[in-house]
Image (cartoon, helix red, strand yellow):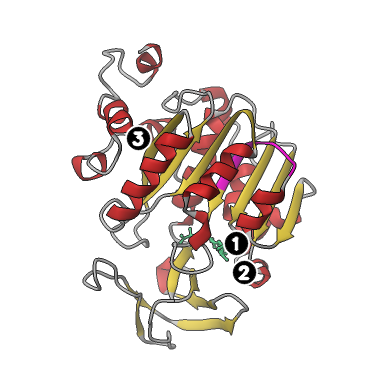
Amino acid sequence: MPDYSQPQDGDVYLEPADLQGSLGLALKVDRVLHHERTAFQELHVLECGPLGRVLLLDGIIQATEFDEPAYHEMLAHVPLLTHPAPSRVLIIGGGDGGTLREVLKHPTVRQVELCEIDGQVVEASKRFFPGLAVGLADPRLKLTIGDGVAFLAETQERYDAILIDSSDPDGPAEGLFGEDFYQSVKHALAPGGVAAALAESYYLYQDLIRDTFAVLDEVFPHACYYTAQVPTYNSGLMGFALMTTSAYPLSPPDAMRVGELTPLRYYTEAAHRAAFALPRPALELLPPRIAQLQENIFASGRGGLAGLADD
Ligand code: SAM
């Protein structure tokens, strides 16, 4: 668990820094609305001016009302629009409900299971983040409070999409990043299934991204890395992994299906395509097969990603 100072009313709160302690975010805290030590982590809810309410777990920013749509919409819509008609979806982590809210916007989705290790995150979200928690009362949801690693190892269900909405790999989420876990994700996918996972910023987590994609390249027929601009994550961006068992991962989204996803506050078809176009510091971390695919993303001459599907 990282070492951090306690947020106080009216103070500047410094999030534990990355890059060997050299780069971190500061929050101007108006009020500490809630603080508890759960069985798994320390949980704070802060009020921070234009950022709105902020959820911290073990001192690390998990979500702010200001920019949470960027993270949740990109984690949900990129994989779900890569699948032709997702019906059964599993979310691991994500107890705040933000990813769930986005998944439930897809009209093909009939059932969502969510496995969150810490029931207090769910309770805090219902109490302090109604905009995130909105889907937690939906009849299509089956909620399990438990460890996602054990859940996946034991489930007999097969899912069209599995979304790993975990925290950083230093606390209870550690087991959600290794090869065994990704094997169990693949095993729990139905034929044609897709998965997405938090894969961190290429500026801050180089070793993790290198190791993760080396594994994903072995485990899945296709894996790609994509990013979203999220100013309240250190370095201003968040990375994700998209894994598919058969669908081509760089397929352009279907405009009709995007039109059904309302309201959207970050996601656009163009942002979906552009999210896979990577600069050098990201490409350098990926195995050659994946880097080559993503480096040549616009090389078809047909003005988009579609041409690559024939390569
Ligand atoms: N986007 C966020 C971030 O990285 O800052 C993550 C948000 S979400 C709140 C992460 C959730 O994953 C937390 O509520 C945490 O309790 C949950 N989690 C961590 N480890 C888990 C595990 N092993 N199984 C299930 N949920 C887990």
**Residue 87 on the magenta segment:** no
Point 44% across, 23% down: residue: 251
In the image: residue 308, left or right of residue 130? left
Q: Which of marks 1 and 2 is nearer the N terminus?
A: 1
Q: Is residue 284 above or below residue 201?
A: above
| Residue with the mark numbered 3 | 276
Give the prevailing secondary structure in the magenta stretch. Answer: strand
Is label 1 in contact with label 2 (beta carbons under 8 Å)? yes
Q: What residue type is labelled 1?
A: Asp
Q: In which quarter of the image is residue 188?
A: top right
- Label 1 lies in ligand 1 vicinity (Cβ under 8 Å): yes
| Residue with the mark numbered 1 | 96
- Ligand 1 image-quadrant field: bottom right
What's the CA distance linking mark 1 and mark 3?
A: 26 Å
Secondary structure under the numbered disc 2 in the rendered image: helix
Q: Residue 127 has which mark?
A: none
**Residue 159 on the magenta segment:** yes
Residue stretch in magenta = 156-163
Point 50% across, 42% down: residue: 196
Residue 125 at x, y = what percent? 62, 67
